[in-house]
Image (cartoon, rainbow, N blue to C red):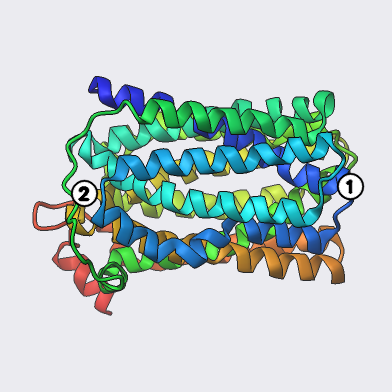
Amino acid sequence: MPPVFRRYVIADGFSQSGTQVTRVALPLVALLVLGAGPLELGLLGAAQMIGFLLFGLPAGVWVDRLRRKPILVTADVLRAVSLASIPIAALFDALTLAQLYAVTVIVSIGTAFFDVAHMSFLPSIVTKEQLPKSMGTLESVRSLAMLFGPGFGGWLVQVLTAPIAIVVDAVSYMISATLLATVKAEETPSGGRVNLMEGLRYVLGHPVLRLVGLVGAMNMFISGIWTIVQPLYLINELGVSAAGYGLMISGAGVGGLLGALLASRVITRFGHGPTIWGTAVLMLPLFVLVAFTGPGWRLALFPIGMGLISLVGVMNNVAQSSYRQAICPEALRGRMNASLRFLMWGSLPLGGLVGGLLGEAITVHQLLWIATLGSVVANLPFVLAPAIRKLKLTDDGGRMDADAKEDSRA
C-alpha cells in the first residue's frame, strides 16, 4: 500500500479508538451520572445519528463540489472541541442532559460530513483494484478499535468517571485531524453546482445499491434499539460493572478483526455478490443466540454472539462498500455515499426514539427480543434476493450480469 494510505490508516486508527471509548462512556454519562431512563437513552441514541438525517444529502453535495481533505480535518476539529466541553462542564458540576444532547448533535453533524468525505476520499489514494484490500484494512482498524476501545473505555469510566473518559475521544480527533492535514492526494472536485438529488436517483435507480440502502436502513433502525438495550440489560438487569460492560462490547471487535482480515480473500475467492449473500444468511441465527444472554454462564453468549455477528458483518460490509466505490463515477461518489448514509444512518434516530418509547412500556428482556427479531428481518432482503448471489463486479460499470438482471426484474 502507498505511504499516503498508511498515514490515512493511522489517522483512522486514532479516530476510531476514541470513538469506541465514547461509545461506552457517553451512554454511561447519561445513565450513571445524570440518571437517564429508557426514553432519555433513546433520545441520546437519536441525537447521535440525527446529523445523517438532517445533513446526509447536503454533505454529499459539499463533498462532490469541494476538496475532501479539508472537510475531513474540519469535521475532526469540530468533534474534538464539542466533546471537550463535557468533561469541563462535569468538573464544574454543571453538566446537564441538555448539554449532552447538544454536544451529541454537533458531533453527529461532524460525523455525517466526515464519513461521506472519508469514504469518497479513499479512491483518490488507492486504485480500484486495491479497494477491497484497502476497505479490509480500514475494517481491521475499526475492529481493533472495537476490540480494545470499549474495554479501555469501561476501565476509564470506572477509574476516572464517564465524563473524564470522553477526553480520550476529543484528543483522538485532534490527532486524526493533524495527520489527515499532511495526507497528499490528487482530488478532482467539480467546483461548480451539483444536483442534490442526483446521488439519490442514482442509488434508487441501481438495483444493487437500492437493496443495499434498504437493508442498511432496516439494520440501522434496529441498531437504534440495540443502543438502548445493551446498557439497560447488561448493567441494570444483569449487574455487569462499567469495566465488564466495556469488555463485553469488545467481543464484537474480535470477530470484526478476523472478518476484516478474511474479507478480501473471501471476495476474491467467491465474488462480491456471493459474499454479501452468504454472510447475510449466516447472521440470521447468530442474532437469536445473543437473545439468550442471561445470568451465569449465559452471560458469555453476548460477546460470543456479537463477535460472530461482527465477523460475518464486516465481510458483508467490505464486499458491498468496495463494490459501490468501484462502480460509481468519481464526480458522483460523494452524493452516492451521502445518499446511502442518509437512507441507512438516518433511520437510526427513529429506531432510538421507538426503542426508548418501547422501553418505557415493556420489560428490557422483551425489548431485547424485539431487537433480535428485528435484526433477523432486516437482513432477509439480501437472503431472499437471487440477484445478489449472481452479482459480479464487471468493467461495464458494475451492473449485474444478464441472469441477475432477469432475477431482479422477476
Q: Residue at x 13, y 58 (%)?
A: 397
Location of the N terminus (image quadrant): top left
Residue 212 visible in the snapshot: no
Q: Residues within 10 Å of mark 2 (few under 14, many from 20)?
A: many
Residue type at mark 2 is Ala
In the displayed structure, would residue 140 be above or below residue 371? above
Measured as percent of width and height from the top left, residue 4 is found at: 26, 24
**Residue 376, image quadrant:** bottom right
Q: Of 271 and 144, which appears nearest the observer?
A: 144
Residue type at mark 1 is Asn
In the displayed structure, would residue 32 be above or below residue 51? above
Q: Residue at x 18, y 62 (%)?
A: 192
Q: Of 218 and 21, which appears nearest the observer?
A: 21
Q: Secondary structure at mark 2?
A: helix
Disc number placed over residue 236 in the picture, else none: 1
Q: Secondary structure at mark 1?
A: helix
**Residue 50, image quadrant:** bottom right
Measured as percent of width and height from the top left, residue 245 is found at: 77, 36
Numbered-mark total: 2
Location of the C terminus (image quadrant): bottom left
Furthest-left residue in this view: 396
Disc number placed over residue 326 in the picture, else none: 2
Residue 198 visible in the snapshot: yes
Sequence-first tag of 1 and 2: 1
